Amino acid sequence: MARLRTAETGRTSIMGAASSMRRDMDLVRRILIAMEESDDGVVDGEALVSDAHDLRSVAYHFAIMQQAGFLTAMVGDTVTGEVQSAFADGLTWQGQDFLASIRSDKVWAKIKLALRKSIGSASWETIRSVGVKLGTAALEAQLGI
């Protein structure tokens, strides 16, 4: 039987594997968009599993996104620590703000290109700040300001 624990406790196997996993900002963005588009605000981690991300990786991202204050999540694991289920069930104000700064495909593409050409990665605060600046510049250009 799976034991359900909130991801923020850090006691699940996914947090123990933190040293072997890397944060993937494309997946973070996919999760935030999926939550916003969900009718009930709940996203099953299985729906985000792909060739690039297994359920353990998705659950890990749910956990670190909860730590960052973006969402609330629940992860179920077996007694051996294998991730059995993962659900994100609430997008926070901070999560919505971060998504607003990176939602635009054009803004996201510019941020990713700039990161690849320069430092390779950045904190979510830096990414959000750049996203806000790009969005503001685009809006000002549209308004002729």
Image: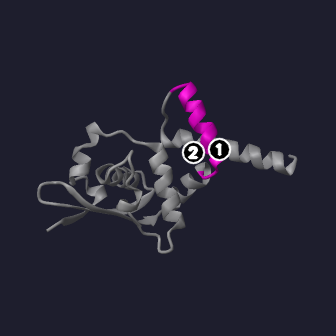
The residue under label 2 is 128
Query: Which of the marked residues, 1 or 2, is nearer the chain's N terminus?
Result: 1
Density class for disc 2 (Cα within 10 Å; few <14, some 14-19, many ≥20) is some
Left or right of 33? Residue 15 is left
Q: Residue at x 33, y 48 (%)?
A: 57
Determine crowd level at label 1: few under 14, some 14-19, many 20+ residues with C-alpha closer than 10 A. Answer: some
Q: Position of residue 75 (x, y in %)?
A: 28, 61
User: Which quadrant of the figure contains the N terminus?
Assistant: bottom left
Please state the total of marks drawn on the protein image. Answer: 2
Left or right, 14 with reference to 90: left
Q: Residue furthest top?
A: 118
User: What SS does tag 2 mark?
Assistant: helix
Residue holding disc 1: 107
Q: Is residue 61 magenta?
A: no
Q: Quadrant of residue 59?
A: bottom left
Disc 2 residue type (three-letter):
Arg
Residue most extreme to the bottom = 40
Left-right relation of 7 to 102: left
Q: Residue 73: x and y, percent?
A: 35, 62
Tell me how far mark 1 sits from mark 2, CA to CA: 11 Å
Q: Nearer the viewer, mark 1 or mark 2?
A: 1
Q: Quadrant of residue 24?
A: top left
Name above or below for residue 57 compared with residue 2.
Answer: above
User: Could you tell me the amino acid type at mark 1?
Assistant: Val
